[in-house]
Amino acid sequence: MKHGKVNIKGLIVDYIEASRFEGRIIEHTWNNMGWTPKLVDKLRGNWKAGEAIAELGPKYDVIHISAHGNAHGISRDEDSTEGITTENMEFLFKMKNKTKGLEKVVLVVNSACCSSSKEWADLFTRRLGAKCYVGVRKKLAFDEGIVFPVAFYLKMWNCRELNRNSVESAFRKALESVRQKAGWALWSKGKQIIPS
């Protein structure tokens, strides 16, 4: 997808119950970059974010997931033990789509704490077909969940095409420009390409 005449379409699924700042900030960033964002927020119920990703995700080039995360999966609130697991997400895709689902998607960014596991990377890049996946290895502060993704997206702004190479280049540049403690990682085909 070329940035010049071809429009980058992005889906933002903001699943954080307490505040919805991250989704709105990502939406604003993408608008300023000339991308076409679709923000889905105000999701109620444990599976609503997964349903939104499974139903809408295949139509987009980039998916940004804003959620809380822990060993139990991703969820609306920080201490939940009833989040969406990789198994739940895969089930939702099978219910909504007959194909893998995300073959058109170049990048999935999951800003939930502990989202940079092999299970999440395998789900999005191997089983569902997205080209690249970015997740967080540890717990992170709220502002880091916003600052690093914004820097990363802005580094993609000057790319001539949105593909694995441009994503990897932008990711490296974002790591160089933003201090971060949580450890963001880039995955492709189920393998970690760049740990931070």
Image (tube, grey):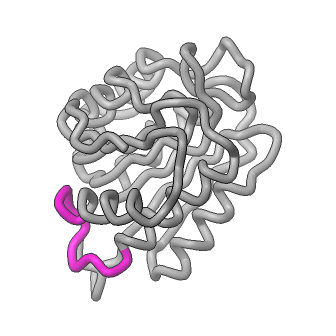
For the point 22% across and 41% down, the residue is 193
For the point 37% across and 55% down, the residue is 59
Q: Is residue 3 above or below residue 110?
A: below
- Looking at the figure, which quarter contains the N terminus? bottom left
Per the image, is 15 magenta?
Answer: no
Residue 65 place in picture, x, y as percent: 53, 44
- Looking at the figure, which quarter contains the C terminus? top left
Residue at the bottom extreme, as displayed: 4
Q: Is residue 174 left or right of residue 48?
A: left
Residue 122 place in picture, x, y as percent: 28, 27
Q: Is residue 127 above or below residue 110?
A: above
Occupied quadrant, residue 46: top right
Q: Is residue 73 above or below residue 166?
A: above
| Magenta span dominant secondary structure | loop
Residue at the right extreme, as displayed: 18
118 or 104, nearer to the observer? 118
Q: Is residue 130 left or right of residue 182?
A: left
For the point 55% across and 54% down, the residue is 12
43 or 96, nearer to the observer? 43
162 or 43, nearer to the observer? 162
Q: Is residue 127 above or below residue 163?
A: above
34 or 47, nearer to the observer? 34
Residue 189 place in picture, x, y as percent: 18, 36
Residue segment shown in magenta: 157-166
Tally of numbered tags? 0
Occupied quadrant, residue 152: bottom left
Occupied quadrant, residue 172: bottom left
Residue 45 place in picture, x, y as percent: 71, 26
For the point 25% across and 67% down, the residue is 162
Per the image, is 161 magenta?
Answer: yes
Q: Is residue 19 left or right of residue 110?
A: right
Q: Is residue 134 left or right of residue 148?
A: left
